[in-house]
Image: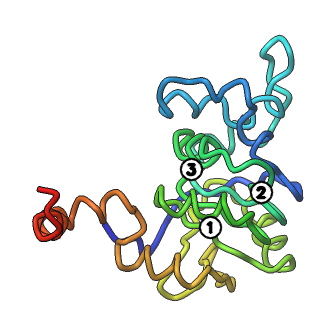
Amino acid sequence: MSIAKVAGRGVYVPGNDIDTDRIIPARFLKCVTFDELGPSLFFDERFDGDGNSKGHPLDEDKYAGAEILISDDNFGCGSSREHAPQAIQKFGLKAVIAGSFAEIFHGNCTTLGIPCVVMDEQSRSKLAEQVQSNPNEALILDLEGEQIIFANEIYPMSMKASAREAFLAATYDPLDNLLSARDQIQDTAQKLGYA
């Protein structure tokens, strides 16, 4: 399925260099399936030792059900754990806007169908302020038009060209690509004598 637009309410989680250990602490990596990861997103930043909320933006009532995460520079740095984008997806977030992304995190998000959108600091700060003032308003990531629409304003954005093309052409999931080419794979296997 191609992804040309992503719409949803936003939530701003401030901070540069938010690494994958902050996104999903290491002790949650021993889960049996990725489905269990959603509640553990930003766990140590959201909860104290007794499990009480620290008032993290993801736990504020006004952002409940938000689907687009906005953050700052070098988002997803640190270890290459695939669990970080999985936790983001399982929490219910469908896209991430930041100043920049760590390369491996960006690639892991792309294969899951989570667009990673880059915005300059001035535009991102303005958008974050607007989202904080209007938390019930949906924003639209227009991947085709390379713009973000929020509260009747248009913001510039950019994406890695290969990721953008993959979303628009529905080729972002390598497993799906492999399965859709099953007949060609079997033909090649027969020609090579493997089948």
Point out the tag, 1 or 2, that comes first from the N-terminus.
Answer: 1
Quadrant holding the C terminus:
bottom left
Q: Is residue 67 above or below residue 188?
A: above
- The CA distance from mark 3 to mark 1 is 12 Å
Which residue is found at the position 81% from the left and 37% from the top? 56
Secondary structure of residue under mark 3: loop
The answer to whether 119 appears left or right of 165 in the picture is: right
Foreground residue, 55 or 88? 88
Q: Residue 108 falls in which quadrant of the image? A: bottom right
The answer to whether 120 appears left or right of 105 in the picture is: right
Mark 2 neighbour density, 10 Å: few (under 14) some (14–19) many (20 or more): some
Secondary structure of residue under mark 1: strand
- The residue under label 3 is 93
Q: Is residue 140 above or below residue 57?
A: below
Picture coordinates of residue 84, whole percent (x, y): 65, 44
- What amino acid is labelled 1 in the image? Cys
- The residue under label 2 is 132
- The CA distance from mark 2 to mark 3 is 17 Å
Foreground residue, 163 or 124? 163
Can you name the residue that lies furthest to the top here?
50
Q: Is residue 134 above or below residue 29?
A: below
- The residue under label 1 is 116
The mark closer to the camera, 3 or 1, is 1
